[in-house]
Image (cartoon, coloured by chain):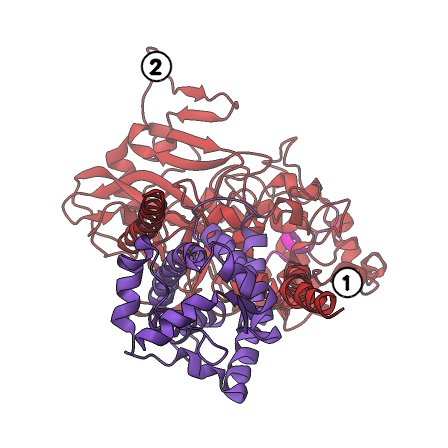
């Protein structure tokens, strides 16, 4: 067994705070959307607006952190081992084969994770933020930006929310695909991942 | 030691700090601002009244009310100029109509409505509410200042009641009754002052032939009501009078009734006292860009006495087996059928209908041919994209009234006369002569053929403002329910009401597919491990 440091304190704080905010945003968002009643419409709106603002502040902090630490490199997509990773998830995992990608502090995401999270960071989050800000401040046609009666912003925002929910479902499941069922969860809590030595050996041999 | 420190750090960054952030977000985010309080001193309490009982000129014996007006004007000179240019006197004003229909001089004098069709031709009855003495016909002198009735607005004794059918003349010794005696001019003149609710209400509560028939939000009960009925006028509250909101300078009274008005000028606004951020709460205050204060704060109208919602003239004229007119009542003891007027539907605690409204209105004018049914007697202008438009609560009065089937024009009808045999509908119950005479009095052509057509009239609501506990709630509008207040108001995206079906269906499909995907994957893993 080997202990590898994967997630810094800020990363873990970022992750779990963001998780809580996304859950709050989702529950209140779909209430505003008219799907159910939990908090009551007014409270849902206030909570949604407040958590959106916190989410944006957290986002600004995170962008700053990603840039100054160089950790943004974790999200740069790569083709290397992409097919192997895909093969692992579609067949290797059922045969107990080892993970094709070795994790480290500077390379904590496999190629599929890289492209997925990059999509989240540069597509879903910005679209949600932008349409959300339009929703909050520019929902009337006489504003300098004509958001076209909110239709486009609202529909995009809704679609983004559905994608986000789908992401959360798959992401939550993927937690269990570590070496052990709780390896990934533990790593996001403690910052360290325990990887079996033999896996490294396999890794080294194939490389 | 090291692991304890590590665990503590983990606890901090993974649980404590995120929890703190979320707690702060919820705590500060879920606050509603405290509404601003307005302190207001009623205008009636502002200055000491002049004691008119000390003026010798007002102690004379007045045979004619016109002589009293002359006495008023002998001190209050030039006020006649102000009044004689007002719509209360002229019953018309130059109005620029929307839809490029140009500038016309319109008002109660020459507009059609869907109550008794028009004041024109029914002077004796309708002109009782003119601020003059005896506008019986075209011979009335609009340039004679002594024809002005100062008392109808300035009597503070609540004893000055003009008789019915007198075209604005009070009772004289010849025609006085117990209900409408000769006014005690000296007593009234000694007690004049700023208009009270009773003064305005004498006409504005009773339009259409009875209490609350027309407006729905203006009626006698508001003379002595509680805060639930009207927060401003409540006796046990601020007890404001009409002019506290309808601010008046030099007899120019602010406020518009869009049954006769067309332009977005000289209006009375809630914002004058309350500002446009009265809630002190961003989310709620922002609504004011597109939602009139009235929309949330007048959730129902006709809170005490019913108002007429539907008036069908085509049913009028029936007689019983003895040839006498018929009267029928509804469960609330309001007349539901009158031979002289037709069929009525009254309603109480009415939910308004909602329209985009920018403060301008079009009107049905003489000569307009019917193009759409129901005919819009007055059309409230506005749409979502118009920066001046707001959602406004409206009383819609629907009815059926006479029109000329050849010219396709709405008809004037002579309904009122002092006695039978003059061709008035209320006396003789004959449509042909009543329409003939009505059209003649308006100087209009009539082919002789008539029928009845559905019409609608729109009354934006402004009165009977409810206390804050009774305002509309978010989900009265932000709901998918067909019962939502704004269920039928189109042209914009309303959160909570609107959604794109395709996007929602696709979204839920994606979620379901994701679930199926991860469950299948998990089952395959479990299955594979067992082998």
Determine whether A146 is above or below B360 in the image.
Answer: below
Q: Which residue is mark 1?
A: B39
Q: Residue B14 shows which numbered tag?
A: none
Q: Are marks 2 and 1 in contact (CB under 8 Å)?
A: no
- Image quadrant in which the C terminus of chain B is located: top left
Mark before the other along the chain sequence, 2 or 1: 1
Q: Nearer the viewer, residue B515 or B455?
A: B515
Q: Is residue B154 magenta?
A: yes
- Image quarter of residue B8: bottom right
Q: Nearer the viewer, residue B233 or A108?
A: A108
Chain letter for the red colouring in the rendering: B
Q: Position of residue B225 (x, y in %)?
A: 69, 40
The boundaries of the magenta stretch are: B147-157
In the figure, is residue B364 to the left or right of A50?
left
Q: Residue B320 shows which numbered tag?
A: 2
In the figure, is residue A114 to the left or right of B199?
left
- Image quarter of residue A118: bottom left
In the rendered image, is residue B316 in sight? yes
Q: Could you confirm whether marks 2 and 1 are on the same chain? A: yes
Q: Which residue corresponds to the image point at 44% horizontal and 48% vertical from the top-left?
A: A34
The tint chain A carries is purple
Classify mark 1: helix, strand or loop. loop
The chain identifier of the residue carrying mark 1 reads: B
Q: Which residue corresponds to the image point at 70% horizontal and 44% vertical from the top-left?
A: B227
Q: Is residue B94 magenta?
A: no
Q: Residues within 10 Å of mark 1 (few under 14, many from 20)?
A: few
């Amino acid at each position: 067994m080997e202990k590898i440091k994967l997630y810094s304190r800020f990363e873990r704080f970022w992750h779990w705070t963001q998780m809580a905010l996304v859950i709050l945003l989702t529950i209140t968002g779909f209430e505003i959307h008219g799907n159910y009643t939990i908090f009551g419409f007014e409270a849902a709106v206030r909570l949604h607006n407040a958590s959106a603002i916190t989410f944006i502040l957290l986002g600004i902090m995170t962008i700053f952190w990603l840039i100054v630490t160089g950790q943004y490199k974790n999200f740069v997509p790569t083709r290397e081992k992409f097919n192997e990773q895909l093969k692992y998830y579609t067949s290797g995992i059922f045969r107990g084969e080892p993970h094709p990608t070795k994790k480290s502090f500077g390379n904590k995401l496999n190629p599929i994770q890289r492209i997925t999270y990059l999509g989240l960071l540069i597509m879903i989050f910005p679209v949600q933020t932008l349409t959300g800000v339009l929703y909050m401040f520019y929902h009337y046609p006489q504003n300098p930006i004509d958001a076209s009666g909110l239709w486009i912003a609202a529909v995009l925002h809704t679609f983004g929310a559905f994608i986000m929910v789908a992401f959360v479902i798959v992401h939550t499941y993927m937690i269990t695909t570590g070496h052990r069922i709780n390896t990934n969860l533990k790593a996001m809590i403690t910052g360290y991942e325990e990887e079996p030595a033999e896996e490294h050996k396999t890794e080294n041999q194939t490389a | 030691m090291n692991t304890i420190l590590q665990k503590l750090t983990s606890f901090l960054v993974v649980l404590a700090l995120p929890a703190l952030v979320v707690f702060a977000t919820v705590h500060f985010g879920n606050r509603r601002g405290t509404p601003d309080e307005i302190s207001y001193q009623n205008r009636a309490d502002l200055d000491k009244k002049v004691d008119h009982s000390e003026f010798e000129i007002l102690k004379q014996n007045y045979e004619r009310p016109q002589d009293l007006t002359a006495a008023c004007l002998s001190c209050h000179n030039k006020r006649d100029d102000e009044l004689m240019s007002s719509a209360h006197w002229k019953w018309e004003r130059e109005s620029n109509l929307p839809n490029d229909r140009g500038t016309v001089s319109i008002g109660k004098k020459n507009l059609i409505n869907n109550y008794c069709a028009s004041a024109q031709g029914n002077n004796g009855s309708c002109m009782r509410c003119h601020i003059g003495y005896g506008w019986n016909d075209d011979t009335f002198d609009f340039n004679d200042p002594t024809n002005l009735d100062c008392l109808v607005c300035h009597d503070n004794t609540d004893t000055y009641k003009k008789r019915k059918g007198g075209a604005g003349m009070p009772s004289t010794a010849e025609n006085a009754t117990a209900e409408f005696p000769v006014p005690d001019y000296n007593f009234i003149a000694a007690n004049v002052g700023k208009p009270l609710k009773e003064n305005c209400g004498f006409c504005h509560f009773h339009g259409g032939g009875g209490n609350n028939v027309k407006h729905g939000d203006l009626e006698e009960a508001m003379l002595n009501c509680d805060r639930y009925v009207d927060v401003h006028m409540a006796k046990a509250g601020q007890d404001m009078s009409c002019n506290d909101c309808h601010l008046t300078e030099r007899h120019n009274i602010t406020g518009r009734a869009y049954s006769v008005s067309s332009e977005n000028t000289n209006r009375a606004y809630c914002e004058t006292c309350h500002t446009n951020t009265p809630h002190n709460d961003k989310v709620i205050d922002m609504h004011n860009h597109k939602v009139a204060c009235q929309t949330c704060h007048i959730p129902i109208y006709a809170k005490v006495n019913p108002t007429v919602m539907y008036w069908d003239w085509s049913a009028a004229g029936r007689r019983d087996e003895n040839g006498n007119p018929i009267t029928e009542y509804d469960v609330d003891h309001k007349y539901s059928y009158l031979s002289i007027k037709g069929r009525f539907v009254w309603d109480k605690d009415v939910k308004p209908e909602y329209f985009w409204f920018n403060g301008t209105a079009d009107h049905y004018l003489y000569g307009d041919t019917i193009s759409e049914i129901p005919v819009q007697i007055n059309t409230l202008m506005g749409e979502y994209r118009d920066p001046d438009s707001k959602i406004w609560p409206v009383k819609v009065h629907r009815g059926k009234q006479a029109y000329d089937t050849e010219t396709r024009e709405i008809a004037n009808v002579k309904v009122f006369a002092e006695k039978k045999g003059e061709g008035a509908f209320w006396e003789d119950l004959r449509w042909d002569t009543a329409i003939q005479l009505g059209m003649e009095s308006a100087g209009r052509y009539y082919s002789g053929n008539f029928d009845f057509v559905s019409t609608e009239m729109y009354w934006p609501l402004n009165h009977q403002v409810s206390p804050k506990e009774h305002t509309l709630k978010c989900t009265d509008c932000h709901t998918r329910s067909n019962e939502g207040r704004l269920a039928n108001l189109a042209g914009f995206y309303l959160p909570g009401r609107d959604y794109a079906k395709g996007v929602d269906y696709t979204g839920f499909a994606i979620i379901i597919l994701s679930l199926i995907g991860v469950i299948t994957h998990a089952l395959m893993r479990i299955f594979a491990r067992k082998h």
